[in-house]
Image (cartoon, helix red, strand yellow):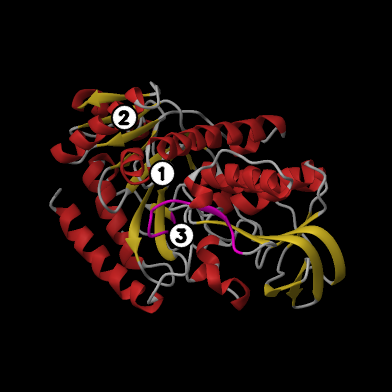
Amino acid sequence: MNILIPSTLSLWSATSTSSQAFPVFEGEHTIDLVVVGGGFAGLSTALHAARKGMSCMLLEAHEVGFGGSGRSGGLVSGKFRASFQAVMAQHGREAALQLHAFGKKAVDCVEQLISEHNMTDACYSRSGYITAAHSSAAMKGLQTAVNWLEIEALDHSSRLIDAEETAAALGTRSYLGGVFNTYAGHLHPLNYLRGLARAATVAGAQIFEHTPVRSIEENGGWVTVVTDQGRIIAKQVLISTDAYSNLTSATKRLARSIVPFRSSIIATVPLNNNVASTILPRGVVAADTKRLLRWYRKVDNRLIFGGRGAFDKDNSPAAFSRLYRQMQDIFPQVEGQRIEYSWSGLVAMTLDYLPHIVRQSDRVMIAAGFNGSGVAAATYAGACVADLLTGVQPQIGILQSLAFNPIPARSLIDPGVRMLTAYYQFLDSWNL
């Protein structure tokens, strides 16, 4: 039996309840703000800027949701790839506390937008998030993380759980324990994106699809944004193309500042109730502590299983097969169940493992580098960008102050990441 069924759609595309086609931009226009990129950060910026009275146009090279945002796993949390302890050690306690507060506000921002704009089809649930320890060293690291949250941030939303409670919550005995974070959840990412687009247009923003930006040039106090069929003169520009910044030369500087990393996802056919009830019975989302992250959630009795590690330019059958084997290792009860959807998207990794909300110049801003945790962080980043553009200073600390320059010897990064990925796969296979 063929377990992996070839698919051209993500589960989200196949189950999205609504869509709206936007026109191609044509002609010439003068406006306050141009947003380049129709993902979480771009749409949130357009929405919040329009709410503040700015005239705004968003330009998307393909369709809203084409990039990593619409292909994501839909996990909503205030976690970052860089630990708060590491940030405190390198940048100080205040910087770590501001980053922690940003994460909390990011989750709140998603929830508020969903509620305010009646995005019921986003299917949001604050289900909680379990980080499961694959080794004793990882368990000690989780203990350190929880101690930091409690002592430094006075945050008691996360607690350690032992192997038995972890097994009961996940439906697998693959882990030594974990951390349960109540301040997290999951949603349907494509429906959420489309909800942001609807809300942005209602607020007065204009959205254009199939409108790649060919050049962005500053001239005096204005920025000229050139597309295939038009030109916009803007006071400000936000570039929020993240891991898809190499689509045109207009965003090549950002493309040289991040490392695209492919994240792959598989989804089973709907499982029968007897099997489905044994997997994630409490409805939480979960991820493990391996170097190449694996995560999973359940939607309509389907098990959705994702992971990092593929470094191909396109969907990789080998990556999907590897995910299927890993899924069976963790959940033997799904052995023989067919995979109905398999898809992938690009994640923008940064060398410091942190997102950046910075000025490229006086008139051009960048919000990018969400390192695979962009549902909440990128949404809130958009609100922060709108504040900055209207003279309000959000408390975003190092996300705004750290340098975000093109990576030196960028051409050597890709082969280096391939080698590091292979090494991590080896270590993870032995639970090291």
Residue 208 versus residue 16: which sits nearer the camera?
A: 208
> Dividing the picture into quarters, in which one does residue 140 lie?
top left
Report the residue marked by disc 2: 148
What percent of the width, then of the height, locates residue 142?
25, 34
Label 3 Cα neighbours within 10 Å, binned few <14 / some 14-19 / many ≥20: many
Please give the name of the residue rendered at 50% of the width and 43% of the height, measured from the top-left corner: 397
Mark 3 → mark 2, Cα distance in angstroms:
27 Å
Residue 80 numbered tag: 1
Report the residue marked by disc 3: 348
Mark 3 → mark 1, Cα distance in angstroms:
13 Å
- Disc on the earlier residue, 3 or 1: 1
Residue 105 versus residue 363: which sits nearer the camera?
A: 363
> Dividing the picture into quarters, in which one does residue 277 lie?
top left
Q: Main secondary structure of the magenta part?
A: strand
Residue 325 versus residue 222: which sits nearer the camera?
A: 222
The part of the chain drawn in magenta is 341-360
Q: Element under label 2?
A: helix
What percent of the width, then of the height, locates residue 344?
45, 60
Please state which amino acid type lies under the numbered disc 2.
Trp
Residue 3 appears in the rendering: no
> Dividing the picture into quarters, in which one does residue 322 lie?
bottom left
- Disc on the earlier residue, 3 or 2: 2
Please give the name of the residue rendered at 20% of the width and 35% of the height, measured from the top-left corner: 139
In the image: residue 380, left or right of residue 133: right
Please state which amino acid type lies under the numbered disc 3.
Ala
Residue 349 lies within the magenta run: yes
Please state which amino acid type lies under the numbered disc 1.
Phe
**Which of the two marks, 2 or 1, is nearer to us in this view?**
2
Q: Element under label 3?
A: strand
